[in-house]
Amino acid sequence: MPVLWIVLIVLALAAVGYVLGRQRALASADGNSRKLHSLPSFYGTSVAIFTMVFSFAALIVWMIVQPIVVENRVAATISPETIPEGRTIGLMMSDVRRVADGLDQAVAQGAMSADQATSIRTEFTDVRERLGQIGVALGSDVGPAVLHAAQRYRAMSATGDLAMTVVVLGLALAGFAVAYSRTHRDFRARNVVERTIRYILIFAASIAVLTTVGIVLSLIFNTIEFFRLYPAWEFFFGTTWAPSFSGRGGGSELGIVPLLWGTFYISLIALLVAVPIGLFAAIYLSEYASPKVRSIAKPMIEVLAGIPTIVYGLFALLTVGPLLLSVFGDDGLGWMQAGTAVMTAGLVMGVMLIPFVSSLSDDIINAVPQAMRDGSLGLGATHSETVRQVVLPAALPGIVGAILLAASRAIGETMIVVLGAGAAARLSLNPFEAMTTVTAKIVSQLTGDSDFGSPEALVAFALGMTLFVITLMLNILALYIVRKYREQYE
């Protein structure tokens, strides 16, 4: 049964439980709600909650665990002799999942029967022909072993889906029955509902923490594995980035220095664009603009923060790059060879960061007590002198924090760099040359069919861990500065 149907059935059962639970509670009190311990809605909510909570929890856990269990069991049945030379069990399992999806499409479209898709006696040539009829192309490296593994994968997945349906609906019915049976006028439904909701809220709040812990642990473990295969000294102090991929000839040089240089260089140009414009915009909006102008200009500036970064990347590739090339290229000053360069990505990223700097600085400037402005004006200072000599120095710690937060945002940007800065890892001071960043190389290293256990794939986690530490330190510093500022004026 599809997951959507299971969810709808459980929700329908919960709705029925709410109505019946409420009616049962009122019936036990002879229709007089004043005789009930709790409001009638709490009794219905109690039945609905116990119908949903355990069943949905089982559904979520099952959907996470089942693919892992099925894949491990199918992988254990694949003989090492059937794995083609130059491929790994991980790549073969990718083919198994793809063929299994193709078999599902073939059954759904009537190209083959369910028995043919499940039976391991089905001829491989027949399967390839039927899948080709519905547009599912199998590569030359997909053989009978992959087909048989895909059939086992489908059969085990179907069994697991059936078991999941039975367990989830069984838990929903059991929760419904238990909650309904204990519904009477003396039952403390309100206490049970509020306690259950509190536990749900605690769990929801814990998800963010657990997710962060999981991300950090995955980075740490894979980074340790990388440094077992590649020297840490060469990674952190090497000046050459030249992955060649194991088994394809030559050794790899994985020095992070040129990637860090490109990251900081592009971020610096972005900040040189964003900080003056954003700060001046914040000063104008908070100190000089009328309420009507502010109500229009501030939302328009913040619209920039809602534009997807891929759109900024396309803007860099199709507009800013050619524009810079026409001025600084061979037809102009001759400094620029292509539209993808540090300057292209830096300028567009700076535009993207303007609302971050502007909004944060605007809030910080507005937080400066009005009494300081009035005191300055009362001593004979002009408005501009008050802004320069009183407001900005008082808001400076918060503004520095806003700039550091914008810097961490710039360091972690990917799509603008991929489309606007190029892919060359080099150490150069020329802003009109193509360079790349840490985030762009993380994408490129995890794209393709390389062995996940090779240094060339694991290096992405070492890059991610390095970037995580850098941005974490920037965020901690920014939050510390902002907190000290707030303590000073609150």
Image (cartoon, rainbow, N blue to C red):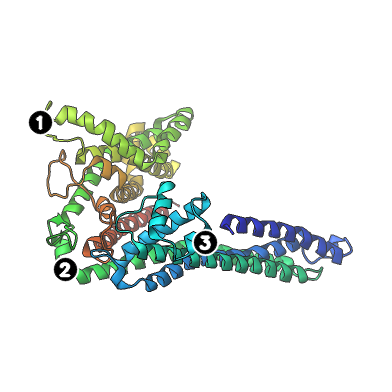
Quarter of the figure that contains the N terminus: bottom right
Q: How many C-alpha atoms fall within 10 Å of the one at disc 3: few (<14), some, or many (≥20)?
A: few
In the rendered view, would you say 225 is above or below 326?
below
Q: x and y percent of residue 7 in the render?
A: 61, 57
Q: Residue at x 20, y 41 (%)?
A: 342
Q: Of discs 1 and 3, which sits in the foreground?
A: 3
The amino acid sitting under disc 3 is: Asp
How far apart are the alpha carbons under marks 3 and 2?
Answer: 53 Å
Instruction: Give the labeled residue for mark 1.
Output: 334
Q: Residue at x 16, y 50 (%)?
A: 425
Tag shown at residue 115? 3
* Camera-side residue of 169 and 187: 169
The amino acid sitting under disc 2 is: Pro
In the rendered view, would you say 345 is above or below 158?
above
* Camera-side residue of 477 and 274: 274
Task: Determine contact: label 1, label 2, CB under 8 Å.
Answer: no
Mark 1: secondary structure: loop
Q: x and y percent of residue 163 in the render?
A: 57, 68
Mark 1 / mark 3, whichever is N-terminal: 3
How far apart are the alpha carbons under marks 1 and 2?
Answer: 41 Å
Based on the displayed image, in which of its 4 quarters is residue 352 positioned? top left
Instruction: Give the labeled residue for mark 2.
Output: 231
